[in-house]
Image (cartoon, rainbow, N blue to C red):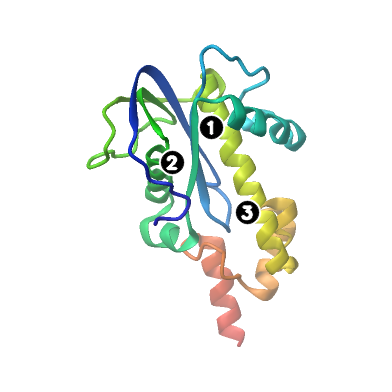
Amino acid sequence: MAPGASYSLALNRPGLIAGVDEAGRGPLAGPVVAAAVVLDPRRRIRGIRDSKQLDAAAREELAPKIRRHALAWSVAWADVEEIDCLNILEATHLAMRRALMGLHICPAHVQIDGNRCPSFVGLRLDCTFEAIIDGDALRSCIGAASILAKVKRDEMMVEQDRLYPQYGFAVHKGYGTARHCEVLESIGPSPIHRRSFEPVRLAASRIQAVA
């Protein structure tokens, strides 16, 4: 089974909309995580917005409410090896496809944050698709997906921090902060660093050159 995926036979639910978003396209380390959420139109969840506009405490408060009250939700990811093999855009789209396939119902329409939709050729989804720029701020279903994706990825990076504490993943979640880059230059990349990303590749090359 693919990382983060939970494949199921989807039941058609006419009129429902699924929101899809990702977290972790920019970091130098860790997976890219995507979520798909079908909100219940009869149960409004107050406070949903783009996860980047919320602090960690607000996201962690909203995430269980979304999981509890949504009609369906799914979180999936593409790991570092897939990112380095495919490139970050294709790995992001792979994670999105996995998240959609993890839904136990099939929505009538899917709204995706960004300016382009992943390819859904070959997937068992009888629905229409729409890419919406800044969709995480404009559509509550996409905002909900952004929150679930961000919370899950943060949890994963905290777990990785226990394995590789010298990098500080629990603090910066793999993003290229000054401290993260200093450590990367000093000791080189860990197994969860994205070696296809230039700062990681250059750091690895420097470490190998002096070894």
Answer yes or no: is residue 33 visible.
yes
Residue at mark 2 to residue at mark 1: CA–CA distance = 10 Å
Residue 185 screen position, x and y as percent: 66, 70
Q: Residue at x 34, y 29 (%)?
A: 11
Measured along the vertical axis of the image, is residue 102 above or below residue 52? Answer: below
Q: Callout 3, which amino acid?
A: Met
Residue 173 screen position, x and y as percent: 67, 52
Residue 42 screen position, x and y as percent: 54, 11
Secondary structure at badge 1 equals helix
Q: Quadrant of residue 109?
A: top left
Q: Name, please, the residue furthest toward the left.
A: 122
| Of callouts 2 and 1, the N-terminal one | 2
- Which numbered marker is on residue 156? 3
Residue carrying label 2 = 99
Residue 14 or residue 175, whichever sits in front: 14
Secondary structure at badge 2 equals helix
Residue carrying label 1 = 145
Q: Residue at x 29, y 33 (%)?
A: 125
Residue at mark 3 to residue at mark 2: CA–CA distance = 16 Å
Categorize mark 3 by other alpha carbons within 10 Å: few (<14), some (14-19), many (20+). some
